[in-house]
Amino acid sequence: MGFREFFRGTTAADDEARSLPPAENQLPLHGGYTLGDAPLGPVTTGNVLKIADAYACVRVLADSISTLPLKVYRRLPAGRVPAGDDARAVQLLTRPSPGSTTVDLVSQIVVHLNVLGDCFLGKYRADNEIVQLAPIHPDRVQVELRGQTCTYILDGRTEHGPSDILHIRAMSMDGLRGMSPVTSCRTALGLNESLRESGRQFFTQGSRPSGVMTLPPGMSNDEIAVAREVFQNRHAGVEKMHQVLVLDGEAKFTPVSFTADDAQFIQSREVSTREIARIFRVPSWAIDGDTGGSLTYSNVGEQARALVVYSLRPWIVRIERAISSDPDLCPGGTYVEFELDGLLRGDATQRADVYTKGLDPITGWLQRSEVRRLENLEPEGES
């Protein structure tokens, strides 16, 4: 069987329509991303992650969501039950592709959604069965609506349907392609980069001295050079900082401090950081930005809960619904769900109060075995 036939699961003469090119034959997955230390230039989806605040926002979302347990369930008349290890969705999400895990796959999905506005997952087959799930860079895919079916044109050459490609969209205006936060808010992102570059140029090429030493008039150039050298030898360098400064004769030293413009520059950087946090719907404190107030023990828990509800949950629901609605991955009553308990659980006192009410013999809804499982304890009698 040839290389293409292996992934198609058919012979060359078969008319099987599910014919994604083999994953090994695709262009590099990173597509338009640019790395390295070259000047950033205009902000694009390919270089936006060079901006520290944008990188921090995307990383908070990708790391938080990808590390949540992703469970696969089946709906039954008596309620839901975990899908067994033989379920195809469980196998594919556990090992989506060679060398990849669920964490890797979900992280790439979140990055693509937040940077590019779309995520396309290729469903690669062998013997007509899906054997790999791998992201395809959105720049390589065109989307067209033909009748009641979305058609995906890969690299301008091959056409595929939903049986080959799973499409997850960010917020959309036309229902076909998601909107990229980077493209939509390019001006705000560019301002942040301009402020960063301005600061880099100031500290790299700026000529502002730390202070001014004034010498008496009439000194020759050689005497001025000697005075400068002696001063540098006595007081320059980290190990000589904060020593007592003593000058001879009529010489005097005037330190140069930050000006109001310098302070305004720092404030502008803080405002720009909060602006980028708003673009990616991430609270400023999550990327170590200025919060405009103090965090206390009483409100840290509520802020963390707000991060889950307003920042993570919208992306989580989009990913869950897209995967669960795919008949190839989740046939029948199968569906996937992220487990948020680890992020939303309270402290020991709060959990004990909930468990006490849940175990009440009249109004309770929990059993002791369920409580032990929620606390990651061994079943009773097995300790």
Image (tube, rainbow, N blue to C red):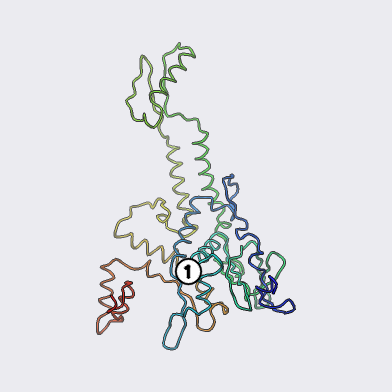
Where is mark 1, residue-wise?
Answer: 316
Q: Position of residue 64 (x, y in %)?
A: 44, 63
Q: Position of residue 380 (x, y in %)?
A: 28, 78
Residue 131: quarter of image: bottom right
Say which residue appears at 50% left-offset and 75% top-offset: 90
Say which residue appears at 55% left-offset and 62% top-offset: 112
Residue 76: quarter of image: bottom left
Dot 1 amino acid type: Ile
In the image, 74: left or right of 30?
left
Residue 379: quarter of image: bottom left
Nearer-the-camera pick, 356 or 179 = 356
Say which residue appears at 53% left-offset and 38% top-offset: 201
Compared to residue 15, the image places residue 199 above or below, namely: above
Compared to residue 110, the image places residue 321 above or below, namely: below
In the image, 12: left or right of 71?
right
Q: Dot 1: within a 10 Å radius of its alpha carbon, few (fewer than 14), some, or many (20 or more) residues? A: some
Q: Secondary structure at mark 1?
A: helix
Nearer-the-camera pick, 93 or 118 = 93
